[in-house]
């Protein structure tokens, strides 16, 4: 007997991944590694005149190598057609080969995944000015899906990283806000629920590094940020259950910060980045509220 939730998730994933990749208007490197690249999409459509807010997109895929930025290019194009300037960031992910005692490709690289996101965010104002003149970097919103949602929250929290962290900023990054989409936002909750086969622990280098590295990576440990933050989550998500987002929002409240939580009824994990889904328009509206 089939599980209706699993069937729905499979259908939603098939829809999101059915769109052909959309090529960028420009690309720029922020480092020497092939994965250290940003693709830019110019704003288009009726509202594209003049400068436009910059939306930084960090893709998901459990920080694993097989999943790169190509699967969110239709989402980037969707945002560009809504009048946003878009930067689709690539970063180094886990090895393509399974590690011993790991099921499938391992999640993330420590510290390279975080090195890359920090370097990309630091380089983006200059890269966007050169590659995408229509982008107004003073109105930057960071968004990310799933594992990319964790990276988006982390990118906005670098000023509250533990002292001595190489990624720590001396002041809050100049962002209008964060819109995290079904993010792996609380590593403790994610591991308890077995999200993505223990990907959070793999990202940190394995269980032996969990306690030492958690304060440097877990969004739920990096609060308050003082930066406007909204989490959008499908109420029927079985990939990253809404309980992970709810745990992060609760941690923020305990730290004295209010984080918005929009639970989209009747959808799971993938419609949030699927231009054919109504949930994608909900995401665009949440971004608009912070950016414009």
Image: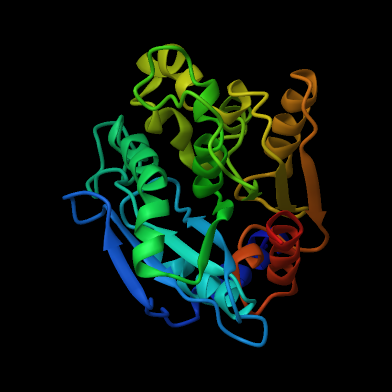
Q: Nearer the viewer, residue 50 or 29?
A: 50
- Asked whether residue 197 appears in the rendered view, the answer is yes
Q: Could you tell me which residue is drawn at 24 percent across and 44 percent down?
A: 95
Residue 132 quadrant: bottom left
- Compared across the picture, whether 246 is left or right of 151 comes to right
Q: Could you tell me which residue is drawn at 33 percent across and 49 percent down?
A: 91
- x, y (%) of residue 93? 32, 46
- x, y (%) of residue 110? 31, 30
Furthest toward the right, the residue is 265
Q: Could you tell me which residue is drawn at 25 percent across and 54 percent down?
A: 35
Task: Give above or below for 84 relative to 66.
Answer: below
Which part of the image, by quadrant, shows the C terminus? bottom right
Furthest toward the left, the residue is 32
- Asked whether residue 70 appears in the rendered view, the answer is no
Q: Could you tell me which residue is drawn at 59 percent across and 72 percent down?
A: 79
- x, y (%) of residue 167? 39, 27
- Compared across the picture, whether 22 is left or right of 179 comes to left
Which part of the image, by quadrant, shows the N terminus? bottom right
Task: Give above or below for 291 relative to 224.
Answer: below
Furthest toward the bottom, the residue is 46
Residue 183 quadrant: top right
């Amino acid at each position: 007997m089939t599980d209706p939730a699993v069937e729905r998730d499979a259908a939603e994933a098939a829809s999101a991944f059915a769109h052909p990749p959309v090529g960028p208007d420009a690309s720029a490197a922020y480092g020497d590694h092939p994965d250290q690249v940003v693709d830019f999409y110019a704003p288009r459509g009726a509202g594209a005149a003049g400068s436009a807010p910059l939306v930084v997109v960090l893709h998901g895929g459990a920080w694993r190598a097989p999943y790169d930025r190509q699967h969110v290019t239709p989402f980037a194009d969707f945002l560009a057609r809504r009048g946003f300037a878009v930067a689709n960031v690539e970063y180094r992910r886990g090895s393509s080969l399974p590690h011993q005692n790991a099921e499938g490709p391992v999640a993330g690289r420590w510290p390279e995944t975080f090195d890359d996101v920090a370097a990309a965010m630091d380089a983006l104002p200059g890269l966007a000015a050169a590659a995408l003149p229509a982008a107004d970097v003073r109105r930057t919103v960071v968004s990310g899906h799933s594992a990319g949602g964790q990276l988006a929250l982390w990118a906005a929290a670098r000023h509250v990283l533990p002292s001595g962290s190489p990624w720590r900023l001396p002041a809050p990054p100049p962002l209008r806000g964060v819109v995290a989409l079904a993010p792996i936002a609380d590593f403790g909750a994610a591991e308890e629920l077995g999200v993505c086969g223990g990907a959070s622990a793999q990202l940190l280098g394995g269980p032996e590094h969990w306690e030492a590295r958690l304060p440097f990576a877990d969004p739920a440990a990096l609060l308050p940020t003082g930066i406007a933050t909204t989490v959008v989550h499908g109420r029927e998500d079985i990939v990253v259950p809404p309980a992970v987002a709810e745990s992060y929002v609760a941690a923020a409240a305990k730290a004295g910060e209010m984080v918005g939580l929009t639970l989209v009824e009747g959808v799971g994990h993938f419609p949030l980045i699927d231009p054919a889904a109504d949930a994608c328009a909900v995401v665009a509206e949440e971004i608009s509220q912070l950016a414009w």
